[in-house]
Amino acid sequence: MSDTTARPDLLSWTCPAPVRDRPRVVMGHGGGGAMSAELIEQIVLPGLGGPVQAALTDSAVVELGGARLAFSTDSFVVRPLFFPGGSIGDLAVNGTVNDLAMSGARAAYLSCGLILEEGIELDTVSRVAEALGAAARAAGVRVVTGDTKVVEAGHGDGVYINTSGIGLIPAGVDLRPERVTPGDVVMVSGAIGVHGVAIMSERENLRFEVEIESDCAALGGLVDAMLSVTSDLHVLRDPTRGGLAASLNEIAAASGCGVVVQERAVPVPQPVAGACAMLGLDPMYVANEGKLVAFVPREHADAVLAAMKAHPLGSEAAVIGETVTDHPGMVVARTGLGGTRVVDMPMGEQLPRIC
């Protein structure tokens, strides 16, 4: 690996104290970990005046006119706007499509809100819009409404995007962490940590022997392939901010089950492992944008895994662990040396502005 410019400012990658100890918002509140949850639970939900359905999940499941719909919204503030393997336009579509897919829904319609900073080149806006449109067509979803705002120079970062989406949930599909039971098989659809390292390498102008490209992709087709085997999947989650560790901890806490991960079974590409080792990062906490983690009843695990491997976005799928009755609500990893370590929920985030 070579570094062609100044090394990244590692001192800025810190996890600030929880919201209860801070009078102001800090970057860690946007990391998808414990600080994000505290911000929502202690500030946002009380301000809304009551319980909000699915406030702490990526999409809500609602009924309308006899149909079960998944509804989701997401905002994208990635820096830089373009990176190896994708752009903010790709993220804006795929991120929302994937949030819906984790409820078992195939996305049908999206909205798109653009917040543009005064002074950004129109050619850049055009590139973002073209990437967004191409991603929508590839995902089989239509952008049907939207909004555009412009803020003064110095009050934005080029382009921010918000997308919301809706999709139908097939009959018999019920994906939620409360359905997880001891003995479930835990699997991932492929290599982890790729997106976060791709963003970091582009942002800090780091160069590796092999270029690392983001795994940004729409997962609706992969989920359809899994559901074609059985509708009795227990829960799906796309491990974006906070990485695989955050998703496993959220599911463990909501289900009351313990989760045991075989560390050597978790697929981490060698370039990602090398970059994380050099920079002091743990791949378990690095964001993904085209992967999912699934908790599957043991009797369906082999067939679901085979269906995943037969799909282009699941060709590297692997079983990484199981749920247990021991240490309820906690995630532990069994290391290659035979030891065990606790995989905590991240407090803030290792790499800000990655989606």
Image: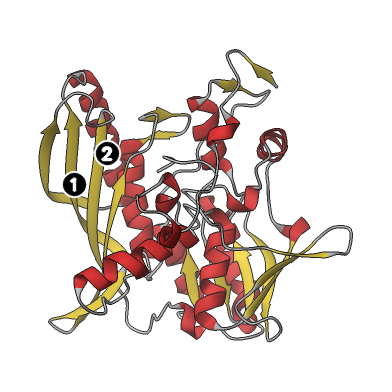
Q: What residue do we see at 30% from left, 74% from top?
A: 169
Q: Which mark is residue 132?
A: 2
Question: In the rendered structure, which amino acid carries the disc numbered 1?
Answer: Cys
Q: What's the CA distance linking mark 2 and mark 1?
A: 9 Å
Q: Does 18 appear above or below 196?
A: below
Question: In the rendered structure, which amino acid carries the disc numbered 2?
Answer: Leu
Q: What residue do we see at 64% from left, 74% from top?
A: 330
Whether residue 222 can be seen here: no
Q: Which of the 4 quarters of the picture holds residue 42?
A: bottom left
Whether residue 332 can be seen here: yes
Left or right of 112: which side holds 80? right
Q: Position of residue 163 (x, y in %)?
A: 24, 50
Q: Which mark is residue 250?
A: none
Q: Determine contact: label 2, label 1, CB under 8 Å.
A: yes
Q: What residue do we see at 42% from left, 45% from top?
A: 27
Residue bearing mark 1 = 112
Q: Secondary structure at mark 1?
A: strand
Left or right of 17: which side holds 164? left
Q: Does 27 appear above or below 72?
A: above
Q: Which of the 4 quarters of the picture holds residue 78?
A: top left
Q: Position of residue 166 (x, y in %)?
A: 23, 63
Q: Secondary structure at mark 2?
A: helix
User: Which one is nearer the viewer's eye here, 210 or 161?
Assistant: 161
Q: Position of residue 178 (x, y in %)?
A: 47, 83
